Amino acid sequence: MEDNKMTQEEQNQPEAASEASAPMVVNAVEEIKAQQALAEKTGKSEEKVKHIGYWHLIARRFFRQPRAVIGVTIFVILALIAIFGDHFAKFSYSDPDFTALSSAPSADHWLGTDSSGVDMYSAMCHGLGRSMTIGILSSLISTVIAAIYGTAIAYFRGPVEKIGMWLLDMLMVIPSFLLIALMVRAANASAGWVWLVFGLSVFGWISEARVLRTVALSLRERDYVKASKYMGVNSFTIIIRHLIPNLASIIILNMLLGIIGSVGSETGLSFLGLGIKLPDTSLGSLLSGGQSVMQTAPWVVLEPAFTLIVLCVSLMMISDALRDAIDPRSGASGHAGA
C-alpha cells in the first residue's frame, strides 16, 4: 500500500510542477509584450534611436535646455508683438495725441506718451518691428555673402586665396560705421531703413568670412571633395553642395550672433541721429528721443531700453543653447536615446 501511495505522489509531482510553471511562462510572455508595447508607445525603440537624423538630434539637444525654450518663447512673443501689436493700439505712432503730452501710462495710453504726444505702445510695436527687420535681413544677407566668399577662397588655392585674404584685410580697416552713417543720411526718411540694411550687409560679412574660411580649410581635404573634383564636378557646385552644407551649424550660429550685432549697430546709429529718421521709428530712435525727458518722463527711455535688452538676451540664450547642442563635448548634448 505504501508503495502504491508513493507512486501516485510521484506521478502527481510532474503535474503539479507543470501547473506551477505554466503561470510563470504566461507572465513572462505578458511582461515581454508589455515592454514592447511601452517601447512603441514612448517611441524609444532601438530602431528609432539608430535611425535618428543629425538635425533631429540637434533639435532634441536644443529644446532639452531650459534656456533654449525660454529664449525661443521670448523671441516669438516679441515677434508677435511687432507684427500684430499695432492692431490693438488705440492710437497710431504717426498720429500724436496733443491732449496728452508726456502723460504717464493709463487706460488710453498703455505705455504713456512722449513729449510730442506719440503713443509709446504704438511706437514700441513699430520700432521693435523695424529693429528686428533690420537685424534679421542684414544678418541673413551678410551670412550668405560670407558663406560663399569664405568657402570659395578656402577651396581655391594659390593666388585666389592670397588675393581673397588681402581683400578681407583691406576691408577690415575701412571705417564702416561712418560710411553707413553717410549712406543713411543721404537717403530720405522712408527709405532710410533700406539703406541701413544695405550698409550693414555690405560691411557685416567680413569678419564672418574669415571664420568660415578657417573652418573650410579642413573640409577641402576631405575625400568627397577630392572625389568630386576628380569626377569633373563644377567648382561652384562643390562649394554650394558640399562645403557650405557641412558648415551649416556654424553658419546658423553666426547668423544669430549677427542679428544681435546688427540690432546693436542700428540702435547706436539711430541714437546718434545717423540712422532711422522721423516719421519712421526704431528702438534706437526712441532712445534718442527720450534722453531729453529722462527725468520728467522716464518711461519714454526705460520702455525701449528694456525691450532692447530682452530682445538681445533672448537671442543670446538661443545662440548659447544652439552652440551647446552642436558641440558634442557639451553637457547639454546628452545621449541619443535619452
Image (cartoon, helix red, strand yellow):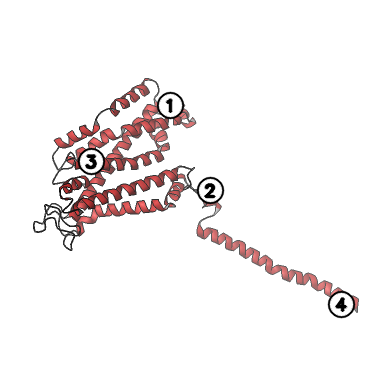
Numbered label tally? 4
Q: Where is residue 110 in the image (x, y as percent from the top left)?
A: 19, 60
- The extreme bottom residue here reads 1
On the picture, is 289 further left or further right than 175? left
Q: Which residue is drawn at 24% across and 52% down?
A: 82
Q: Mark 3 points at which residue?
A: 268
Disc number for residue 232: 1
**How far from the left and from the top, in percent, is residue 161?**
37, 24
| Tag 1: amino acid | Gly
As measured in the structure, the alpha-carbon distance from the residue carrying label 2 to the one carrying label 1 is 35 Å
4 and 3 marks in contact (CB < 8 Å): no
- Residue named by callout 4: 5
Name the side, left or right, on which 335 lies relative to 74.
right
Distance (Cα) linking label 4 and label 3: 104 Å
Within the image, what quadrant is residue 284 found in?
top left
How much space separates mark 2 and mark 3, taking CA atoms?
49 Å
For marks 1 and 3 on the same chain, the one whose residue lies earlier in the sequence: 1
The amino acid beneath tag 2 is Lys
Observer-nearest residue: 18 or 91?
91
